[in-house]
Image (cartoon, rainbow, N blue to C red):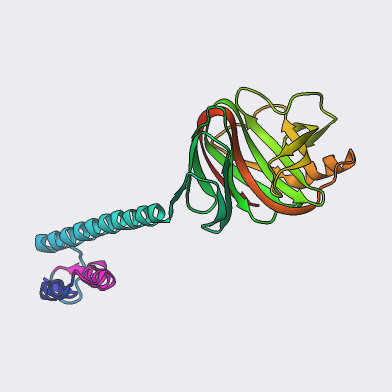
């Protein structure tokens, strides 16, 4: 029998050259060790006799050993990659329990409450997780953009939305000149805001929204204690949780404008969780489409 291939001694030599300190070099060594087996051809008899035979048993064992080692290495690398990703995400998280605004992981965030207990954990990108137990208090938190836009299309996914009592899941923001607080409400808890009779109705993103305007007198605002209007666009049925959703904000802005309600210069704009005299938990991720 004659063998057209590398010899077993070469595999043994390669195995001795491996190092465990350099993963890239280790992969190269494994690749070189296995390469001969992809080119082995065994022949029986003398030259010119092309009748094929099964390779010797010790070659099969070498192939099996190398493939098993490669499989173990792949599993180890997958585990290490997942561990490093988890550590990175955890180290990037930030928990907030007091009033503040700022930037985290490329997104603006806002946390405001007047009383009660609440904390928000800022996750990667546009993600946040908030738990609250307010008693008689009010809470508004979320992630989004420091400067809003009337033409922004917002994508979001509410993986967890578990209010107990009065709460809203809404695109929320402010404008100046005029000072306006606005809501596009996609879900709520025990009470659908803001009450009263809608002025108009629009259709957007596969649903129907009722339009309302309310007034706050001597109330907290981004300009201190002021009197100002609130514009509301409230979906007639709650949106489902756990799936990607879209808010085309321009449709709501146009609906408000058509009834004479104009926005000013945009301040911040967030995908918000608001709670009032309630408790609950929400986990939400927002992005611009």
Can you give x and y, in whole percent of width and height, for residue 256 in the image?
A: 83, 40
Q: Nearer the viewer, residue 200 or 6?
A: 200
Residue 246 vertical placement versus 3 (above, below): above
Residue shown at 78%/41% (left/top)?
228
Report if residue 35 lies within the magenta region. Answer: yes
Point out the stretch of residues depicted in magenta: 20-44
Give the overall secondary structure of the magenta segment: helix
Q: Quadrant of the N terminus?
A: bottom left
Residue shown at 14%/68% (left/top)?
44
Report if residue 214 lies within the magenta region. Answer: no
Q: Nearer the viewer, residue 10 or 162?
A: 162
Residue shown at 55%/59% (left/top)?
106
Residue 119 vertical placement versus 45 (above, below): above
Tell me if 253 is positioned left or right of 115 in this view: right
Q: Can residue 163 be seen?
A: no
Can you give x and y, in whole percent of width and height, for residue 254 in the image?
A: 84, 44
Can you give x and y, in whole percent of width and height, for residue 103 in the image?
A: 55, 57
Q: Quadrant of residue 72?
A: bottom left
């Amino acid at each position: 029998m004659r063998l057209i291939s590398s010899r077993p001694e070469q595999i043994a030599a390669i195995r001795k050259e491996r190092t465990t300190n350099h993963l890239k070099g280790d992969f190269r060594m494994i690749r070189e060790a296995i390469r001969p087996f992809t080119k082995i051809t065994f022949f029986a008899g003398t030259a010119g006799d092309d009748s094929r035979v099964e390779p010797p048993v010790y070659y099969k064992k070498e192939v099996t050993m190398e493939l098993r080692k490669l499989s173990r290495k792949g599993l180890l690398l997958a585990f290490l990659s997942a561990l490093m990703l988890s550590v990175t995400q955890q180290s990037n998280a930030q928990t907030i329990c007091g009033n503040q605004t700022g930037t985290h992981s490329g997104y603006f965030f806002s946390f405001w409450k007047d009383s009660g207990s609440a904390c928000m954990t800022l996750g990667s990108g546009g993600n946040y997780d908030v738990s609250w137990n307010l008693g008689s208090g009010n809470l508004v938190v979320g992630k989004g953009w420091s400067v809003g836009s009337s033409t922004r299309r917002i994508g979001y996914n509410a993986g967890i939305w578990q209010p107990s009592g009065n709460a809203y899941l809404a695109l929320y923001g402010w404008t100046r000149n005029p000072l306006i607080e606005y809501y596009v409400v996609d879900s709520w808890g025990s009470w659908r805001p803001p009450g009263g009779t809608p002025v108009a109705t629009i259709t957007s993103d596969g649903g129907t929204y009722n339009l309302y305007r309310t007034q706050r007198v001597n109330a907290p605002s981004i300009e201190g204690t002021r009197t100002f209007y609130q514009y509301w666009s409230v979906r007639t049925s709650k949106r489902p949780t756990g799936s990607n959703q879209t808010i085309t904000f321009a449709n709501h802005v146009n609906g408000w404008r058509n009834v004479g309600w104009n926005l000013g210069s945009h301040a911040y704009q967030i995908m918000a969780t608001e709670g009032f005299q309630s408790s609950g938990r929400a986990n939400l991720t927002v992005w611009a489409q």
